[in-house]
Image: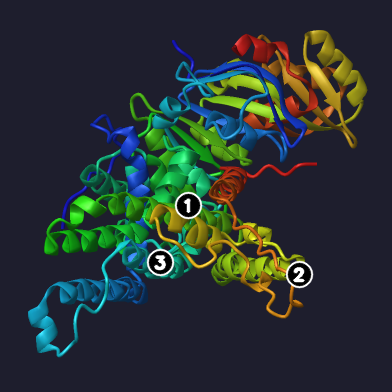
């Protein structure tokens, strides 16, 4: 399958400073999450996909097309929802979105019809004739989504779409993103600080840290393959207990006041941990049993450089 | 009420040709401008001098009308100078219109961070500038060279044989009009891209012409030269290039009137500075336009890159 986004040795320098350092990888997911702390290079990556920044080295391709050499063809297939407020002053919602759709190449009548559809789809049907300046923050986010989808793109780039939304509006936005994702032939890139948003909507995640790839993984496969975790609070000789657990094949990390974290291999059952605790005379006061989450993947990625896992994902 | 589909659909229908996309921007900007009633009134009022010129042409060819109005003989000679004067009057109205409409074309897009929205579509920066310039070109053409060409047609229709001798004036009207429109459009767009406040941007545009003219006259007066006019775009266009285009002699075109020194002692001859040559005037205008394009190129970017 042709990757949605493919980048090879992608280096982007802005203002004499290198922001992205030779990124290489291929993204094939239906919904790709773009994660990273502030200044990691997420927005630079999205801007490079849009052709706003030219790579100083390397290439980036969208749907097999080079972003630098075939910028217009690439942009024809893209819908972009920017992070910050971006509007045309003094326009009503419907006129703004129609205008954007016409600029994308839709004939005026088609643009108008699809504008109405987009407004009803995002839930702003009743407010579509109001001036954009009178919209609330949540409505503005939805209007930005409407302008990104009105021309029917194949790839949607969403930069922090849930920024500033209250919980119901955020849920609505995530639901819309999932619906769009499930449309056949549709892909989206979701850049967000909120791990939960990415976890809910995405099946692949690219984690950037300081302009480098910290992790590039398929979330579904990660979830299936990920090990089980035990978070324990114990009293007794926890050192002896941890050593015995490690001899069984577990990975243990000890913290203060008897707290420990155990990573269970697939073949070890929970019952064996109870038996071991009993043998070592350790009381288990609290046990939290869970699987690896995106948060764990993210935190691990922030601690270690690009591992074999990301290379494998390529 | 229409029932709209509440699902996401990709669009696979026909697209408008790429070359025509900039016209979308022009069309929407014109709608926005004509939403303002004072602006619409201004556009209508700027046709009044043209109507009066049309009446003058008619009166000079209609003895009956002159008799009715009790006017003696032909009231005005319709020649290249007449058309140049009409275009000059309209040129200043066009300048006022540019000072009104121009600053509002680019600055709001920059203030509202709308450029990423334009440029994330199959739409280039050049098309953006072309679209915005198209607004001014259409508006200004409608009150300058286009109606003056109509007046030319009126004159040619009323006087047999006149067209054969003066057909070249059509080219002069077109070129002179387009030159003025290009210069003021580019200047106003460049100012609009760099000055966020509308009033300040308009004042800046006035300043370029009027402060520039004052400064040029000051240099000419102090240094007894005409080279100061190189800073006076209005003079270069109206005083040097247009007279050549309309083949009319202007009193001391390009020369410095302050350089005539009547108080010089007898026997001393004041050397009047040479007028600005045409090629130099053209060069300055081209450089001014190039600087405007450079300024636009620097400012109109989807994302601003902060150096350092």
Q: Which quarter of the picture shows residue A258? A: top right
Viewer-side residue, A40 vs A263: A40
The answer to whether residue B202 of the structure is visible from this angle is: yes
Task: Give the residue at x 74% y 37%.
Answer: A15
* Percent of width and height locating residue B213: 61, 68
Disc 3: which chain? B
Q: Marks 2 and 3, Cα distance to the nearest angstrom?
A: 29 Å
Disc 2: which chain? B
Judged from the image, the secondary structure of the residue bearing numbered disc 2 is helix
Q: Which residue matches tag 1?
A: A141
Quadrant location, the N terminus of chain A: top left
Q: Which residue matches tag 3?
A: B88
Q: Residue furthest left?
A: B64
Q: Is residue A98 left or right of residue B102?
A: left
- Vertically, is A49 above or below B108? above
Viewer-side residue, B283 vs B72: B72
Mark 2 against mark 3, which lies toward the viewer? 2
């Amino acid at each position: 399958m042709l990757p949605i986004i493919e980048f090879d040795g992608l280096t982007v320098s802005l203002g004499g400073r290198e922001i992205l350092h030779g990124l290489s990888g291929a993204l094939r997911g239906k919904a790709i999450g773009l994660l990273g702390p502030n200044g990691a290079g997420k927005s630079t990556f999205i801007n490079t996909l849009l052709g706003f920044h030219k790579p100083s080295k390397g290439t980036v391709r969208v749907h097999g097309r080079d972003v630098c050499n075939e910028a217009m063809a690439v942009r024809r297939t893209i819908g972009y929802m920017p992070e910050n407020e971006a509007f045309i002053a003094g326009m009503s919602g419907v006129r703004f979105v129609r205008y954007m759709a016409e600029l994308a190449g839709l004939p005026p009548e088609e643009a108008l019809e699809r504008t109405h559809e987009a407004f009803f789809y995002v839930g702003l049907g009743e407010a579509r004739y109001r001036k954009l300046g009178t919209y609330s923050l949540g409505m503005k986010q939805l209007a930005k989504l409407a302008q990104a989808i009105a021309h029917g793109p194949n790839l949607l780039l969403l930069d922090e779409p849930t920024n500033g939304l209250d919980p119901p509006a955020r849920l609505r936005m995530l639901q819309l993103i999932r619906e769009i994702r499930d449309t056949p032939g549709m892909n989206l890139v979701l850049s967000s600080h909120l791990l939960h948003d990415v976890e809910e909507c995405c099946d692949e995640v690219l984690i950037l840290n300081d302009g480098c790839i910290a992790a590039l993984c398929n979330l579904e496969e990660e979830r299936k393959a990920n090990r089980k975790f035990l978070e324990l609070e114990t009293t007794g000789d926890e050192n002896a207990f941890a050593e015995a657990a490690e001899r069984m094949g577990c990975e243990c990390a000890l913290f203060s006041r008897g707290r420990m974290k155990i990573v269970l291999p697939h073949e070890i059952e929970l019952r064996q941990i109870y038996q071991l605790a009993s043998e070592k005379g350790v009381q288990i006061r609290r046990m939290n049993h869970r699987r690896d989450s995106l948060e764990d993947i993210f935190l691990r990625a922030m601690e270690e450089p690009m591992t074999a896992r990301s290379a494998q994902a390529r | 009420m229409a029932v709209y589909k509440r699902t996401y659909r990709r669009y696979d229908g026909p697209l408008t040709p790429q070359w025509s996309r900039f016209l979308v921007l022009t069309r929407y900007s014109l709608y926005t401008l004509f939403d303002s009633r004072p602006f619409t009134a201004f556009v209508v009022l700027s046709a009044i001098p043209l109507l009066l010129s049309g009446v003058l042409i008619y009166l000079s060819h209609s003895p009956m009308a002159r008799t009715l109005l009790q006017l003696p003989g032909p009231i005005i000679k319709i020649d290249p100078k007449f058309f140049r004067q009409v275009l000059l009057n309209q040129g200043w109205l066009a300048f006022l219109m540019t000072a009104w409409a121009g600053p509002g074309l680019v600055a709001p897009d920059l203030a509202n961070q709308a450029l990423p929205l334009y440029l994330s579509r199959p739409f280039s920066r050049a098309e953006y500038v072309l679209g915005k310039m198209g607004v001014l070109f259409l508006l200004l053409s409608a009150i300058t060279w286009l109606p003056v060409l109509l007046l030319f047609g009126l004159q040619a229709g009323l006087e047999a044989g006149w067209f054969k001798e003066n057909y070249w004036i059509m080219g002069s009207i077109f070129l002179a009009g387009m030159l003025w429109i290009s210069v003021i459009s580019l200047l106003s767009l460049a100012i609009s891209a760099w000055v966020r406040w509308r009033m300040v941007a308009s004042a800046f545009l006035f300043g370029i012409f009027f402060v520039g003219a004052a400064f040029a006259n000051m240099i000419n007066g102090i240094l007894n030269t005409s080279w100061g006019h190189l800073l006076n775009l209005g003079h270069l266009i109206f005083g040097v290039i247009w007279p050549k285009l309309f083949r009319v002699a202007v009193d001391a075109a390009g020369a410095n009137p302050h350089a005539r020194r009547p108080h010089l002692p007898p026997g001393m001859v004041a050397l009047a500075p040479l007028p600005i040559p045409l090629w130099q005037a053209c060069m300055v205008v081209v450089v001014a336009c190039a600087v405007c394009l450079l300024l636009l190129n620097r400012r109109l970017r989807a994302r601003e890159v902060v150096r350092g």
